[in-house]
Image (cartoon, rainbow, N blue to C red):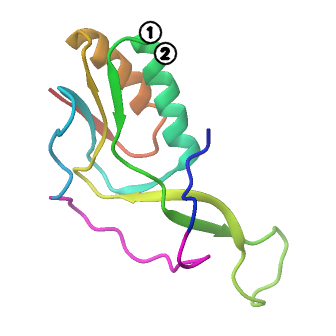
């Protein structure tokens, strides 16, 4: 289950800049315990899926898990040993630009120590530093 949008307005977009802090989605909304990013960076859809699988496996199918981020940014790549110029490469995968303070995952209905161990293993799968919100 690779996350990607069904329809997009533009096939390719420019890189842009990452903001240092996030003040919009920095609080828990659905669950009681959450996983929050402390550094900004780009997370691919495969990394989100790997973290989700690790968290669900540790929770042993108890409780409810929310994924608060969705990969909407197309990331392009040109073939190796290609000369400069000749346009932008094809879309290789999808990702999300996460700023520091964004809540990535939330969980509800499991004991606190189980959720903490699940988020530690899930956070190890992500390329940004994370912390656990209690």
Residue 65 position in % (x across, y down): 35, 27
Question: At numbered mark 1, what does the secondary structure look like: helix, strand or loop?
Answer: loop
Q: Which residue is mark 2?
A: 57
| Image: 68 above or below 55 | below
Q: Which residues are magenta?
A: 8-23
Q: Is residue 35 left or right of residue 59?
A: left
Q: Which residue is mark 1?
A: 60
Q: Position of residue 98 (x, y in %)?
A: 35, 56
For the residues bearing labels 1 and 2, Cβ distance under 8 angstroms: yes
Left or right? Give the position of 31 relative to 6.
Answer: left
- Nearer to me, 25 or 14: 25
Residue 21 in the magenta stretch? The answer is yes
In the image, residue 126 lies at what x, y percent? 45, 40
Quadrant of image for the N terminus: top right
Specify the principal SS of the magenta part: loop
How packed is label 1: few (under 14 Cα within 10 Å), some, or many (20 or more)? few
Q: Name the residue: 49% across, 23% down.
A: 54
Please name the residue shown 65% across and 69% down the image.
Answer: 76
């Amino acid at each position: 289950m690779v996350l990607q949008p069904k329809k997009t307005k533009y096939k390719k977009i420019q890189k842009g800049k990452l903001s240092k802090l996030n003040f919009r989605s920095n609080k828990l909304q659905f669950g009681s315990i959450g996983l929050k990013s402390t550094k900004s960076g780009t997370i691919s859809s495969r990394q989100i899926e790997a973290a989700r699988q690790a968290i669900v496996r540790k929770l042993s199918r108890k409780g409810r898990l929310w994924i608060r981020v969705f990969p909407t940014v197309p990331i392009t790549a040109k073939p190796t040993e290609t000369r400069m110029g000749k346009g932008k490469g094809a879309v290789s995968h999808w990702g999300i630009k996460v700023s520091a303070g964004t809540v990535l995952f939330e969980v509800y209905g499991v004991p606190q120590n189980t959720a903490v161990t699940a988020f530690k293993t899930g956070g190890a799968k992500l390329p940004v530093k994370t912390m656990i919100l209690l």
